[in-house]
Amino acid sequence: MYSASAPLVGALITVMLSINSRLSARVGDLVAAVVIHAAGLVAVSAAALALCEARRPGRIPAYYYLGGFVGVSTVLLCNYAFGAVSASLAVAMTLLGQATFSM
């Protein structure tokens, strides 16, 4: 099941980048990033409330929050790249970067 979800994730990333770039073209990169992350917060909050996951007690290390900064940077850079180059090239370079850094 997990390996079958990988192609779905790839398709969703392509759709997400296309939608995000169109939003960015209409309202600007920074406003689009705020809207995108606000919508994501609403979606994940609804999912968390619906699933009622158990909380783990204890402090969270500060570096765990860096994922949020990386996410915002990713959205801003993808929106900028889609505006500067074609969609295919932006997705291809994104996947190349992911593959390179994962190795």
Image (tube, rainbow, N blue to C red):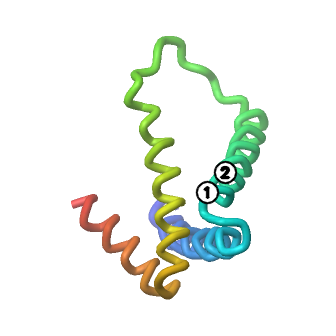
Q: Is residue 71 left or right of residue 30?
A: left
- In the image, 91 versus 26, the foreground residue is 26
Disc assigned to residue 34 = 2
Identify the residue under disc 1.
Answer: 30
**Three-letter code for the amino acid on which mark 2 is drawn:** Val
Badge 1 vs badge 2, beta-carbon distance below 8 Å? yes
- In the image, 27 versus 12, the foreground residue is 27
Gap between marks 1 and 2 measured at Cα:
6 Å
Which residue shows up at 70% across the image and 70% down it?
23
Answer few, some or many: residues within 10 Å of disc 1's Cα (few below 14, many 20 plus, some between 14 and 19): some
Q: Is residue 43 left or right of residue 103?
A: right
Q: Residue furthest top?
A: 58
Label 1: element kind = helix
- Please provide percent x and percent y for residue 4: 50, 68
Label 2: element kind = helix
Q: Is 52 above or below relative to 10? A: above
